[in-house]
Amino acid sequence: MQHHQLSNSIHRTTVGSLAIVIALSAMPLGVLHAAVDGVIIQPEYPDSDESISIMAHGWFPESCWEIDGSYFSQTDKTIHYYINGYPNWWGGCFFIVIPYSHTRILDPLPMGSYTLIVHDGTGHSMDTVFHVTPWLCCEGIRGNIDSEPGGNLIGDLVYLVDFMFNDGPPPLCLTEADLNGDGPIDIADLVLLVDFMFTGGPAPEECPQ
């Protein structure tokens, strides 16, 4: 009887230990998976009068890692966003990656295209490009999508198609591309421009005063 009880105890201990090993093995190891996982910029297309919210999220390599501040540095149109992540070993650590997210506000920037590089202190980084549009834009009727003088609508049409379907750069003045004045830039604006150019359809909306 005692032997039978001992066997059951050993069996339960073995099964329990095996379950723990399997559970731990299913968790990603920090040395393999720690990295910047994504960057969210709000608003998506800021203008030159807007502050810019930048949120970076990812994974730290062990349970002891934590965030201790952050800062920006800029060289021309390249901005570095440093998240000061470091390991705090005082409490004992597990070699299991843990998620983090961190948000900072960037002051308004002049119009143009910028490269943002996020560094999270683990030796990993992520690059993304965002565009700052002018604060004041649009004169007369909408439609100068490529921001070129002369009123060449073919160039504007090509620019709009490239932006909408080929991941091309956004118009420097988003209001110019909102041809029907309803807010979003979508297929209805493209249809309006084509109709106006080739079938004598209605003109785009007036620019806001």
Image (cartoon, rainbow, N blue to C red):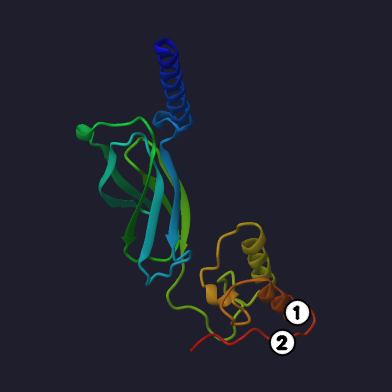
Residue 104 placed where, x, y %? Answer: 32, 57
Q: Is residue 162 left or right of residue 99?
A: right
Residue 197 in which image quadrant: bottom right
Q: Residue furthest left?
A: 90
Q: Is residue 191 left or right of residue 56?
A: right
Q: Residue at x 44, y 22 (%)?
A: 12
Q: Amino acid at mark 2?
A: Pro
- Spot occupied by residue 137 in the image (x, y as percentages of width and height): 48, 78
Residue 45 locus on image (x, y percent): 48, 66
Task: Give the residue at mark 2.
Answer: 202
195 above or below 1? Answer: below
Residue that appears at 62% across and 79% down? 179
Asked whether residue 77 appears in the rendered view, the answer is no
Q: Residue 195 shows which numbered tag?
A: 1
The amino acid marked with disc number 1 is Asp
x%, y% of residue 76? 36, 53
Badge 1 marks a residue whose secondary structure is helix
| Res 206 quadrant in image | bottom right
Taking the view exactly as shown, the residue that stands out farthest to the right is 199
